[in-house]
Image (tube, rainbow, N blue to C red):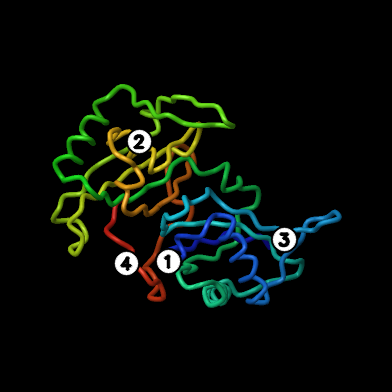
């Protein structure tokens, strides 16, 4: 049986890397006593594959991984979700465990865009609103990047599919800082959240300006219609941090 799993990553665990998260999951599977299928060869590896990497320091309501169970394993999926949540470090919460559709693309291949909530620090609502308006009106937005030791400048305007500033009365009540909702393409060159902030505020350090990064959705397309990989449902109480305000 092949499974697709959706989980959150919130709170202090956000400081762990994508590789660390993979190790957390490998330990959790062993702790939950779930038998996995393994690859062949001299160094067999568990058949687990992970979706798009979350930036270290970023949080998420919508992380995904696929795994293949050992032959003749037919677990109760609802019960398996609870076992995984109990075995993972605090900050992870498994919200879905479903059987993966036969022949479906890998997570890395399938996701076309992600939605992000970005909390800004050191800029006013007026500055943020002006930056968003300028970005949306610009035919091109250039960002400097380094790839394999080579410096390049890319036009990332097409990667910004949607961008808006949340009205102050709609934001989290105990955080008066500006909040952005962004939908960023993940195909092609793609665009990372801190790169978006760098294009909005070129005179400032994007690491200093980006107080919080929260991924809320990962989007795929079927027959020209965009949808979530697995639709969200009400959040579990084990999560140690506020999920935040909503933007689709």
Q: Which residue is at the front of the view, 119 or 84?
A: 119
Q: Residue at x 47, y 67 (%)?
A: 95
User: Distance between the Cα atoms at labels 1 and 4?
Assistant: 12 Å
Q: Nearer the viewer, mark 1 or mark 3?
A: 1
On screen, residue 130 versus residue 3, left or right, reads left
User: Which mark, by number, is residue 161?
Assistant: 2
Are dots 2 and 4 in contact, CB under 8 Å? Answer: no
Are dots 2 and 1 in contact, CB under 8 Å? Answer: no
User: Distance between the Cα atoms at labels 2 and 1?
Assistant: 30 Å
Question: Could you say whether the residue bearing mark 2 is in a helix, strand or loop?
Answer: strand
Q: Which residue is at the front of the view, 3 or 91?
A: 91
Q: Where is residue 150 drawn, in percent x and y?
A: 55, 27
How many discs appear? 4
On screen, residue 28 versus residue 6, left or right, reads right
Which residue position holds label 1? 12
Question: Could you say whether the residue bearing mark 1 is in a helix, strand or loop?
Answer: helix
Q: Where is residue 74 drawn, in percent x and y?
A: 68, 71
CA neighbours of label 1 inside 10 A, class few (<14), some (14 to 19), many (20+):
few
> Which residue occupies the extreme right position in the image?
42
Q: Where is residue 97 drawn, in percent x and y?
A: 55, 66
Question: Could you say whether the residue bearing mark 3 is in a helix, strand or loop?
Answer: loop
Q: Where is residue 247 drawn, in percent x and y?
A: 29, 51
Q: Earlier in the sequence, mark 3 or mark 2?
A: 3
Q: Earlier in the sequence, mark 1 or mark 3?
A: 1
Q: Compared to 64, does 70 lie above or below? A: below
User: Distance between the Cα atoms at labels 4 and 3?
Assistant: 33 Å
Q: Compared to 222, does 67 lie above or below? A: below
Q: Residue at x 72, y 71 (%)?
A: 35
Which residue position holds label 3? 46
Q: Residue at x 42, y 29 (%)?
A: 144
User: Which mark, by number, is residue 242?
Assistant: 4
Q: Quadrant of the N terminus?
A: bottom right
């Amino acid at each position: 049986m092949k499974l697709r799993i959706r989980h959150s990553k919130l709170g202090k665990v956000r400081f762990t890397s994508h590789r660390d998260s993979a190790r957390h999951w490998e330990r959790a599977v062993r702790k939950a006593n779930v038998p996995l299928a393994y690859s062949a060869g001299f160094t067999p590896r568990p058949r687990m594959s992970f979706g798009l990497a979350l930036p270290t320091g970023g949080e998420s309501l919508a992380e995904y991984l696929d795994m293949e169970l050992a032959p003749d394993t037919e677990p109760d999926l609802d019960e398996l979700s609870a076992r995984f949540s109990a075995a993972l470090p605090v900050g992870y919460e498994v919200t879905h465990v479903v059987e993966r559709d036969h022949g479906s693309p890998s997570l890395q291949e399938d996701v076309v865009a992600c939605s992000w909530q970005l909390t800004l620090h050191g800029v006013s609502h007026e500055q943020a609103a002006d930056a968003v308006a300028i970005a949306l009106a610009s035919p091109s937005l250039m960002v400097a990047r380094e790839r394999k030791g080579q410096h390049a400048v890319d036009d990332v305007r097409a990667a910004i599919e949607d961008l808006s500033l949340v009205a102050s009365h709609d934001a989290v009540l105990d955080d008066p800082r500006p909040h952005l909702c962004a939908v960023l393409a993940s195909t092609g060159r793609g665009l990372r959240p801190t790169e978006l902030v760098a294009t909005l505020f070129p005179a400032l350090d994007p690491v200093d300006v980006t107080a919080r990064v929260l991924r809320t959705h990962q989007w795929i397309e079927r027959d020209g219609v965009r949808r979530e990989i697995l639709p969200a449902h009400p959040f579990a109480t084990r999560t140690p941090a506020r999920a935040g305000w909503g933007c689709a």
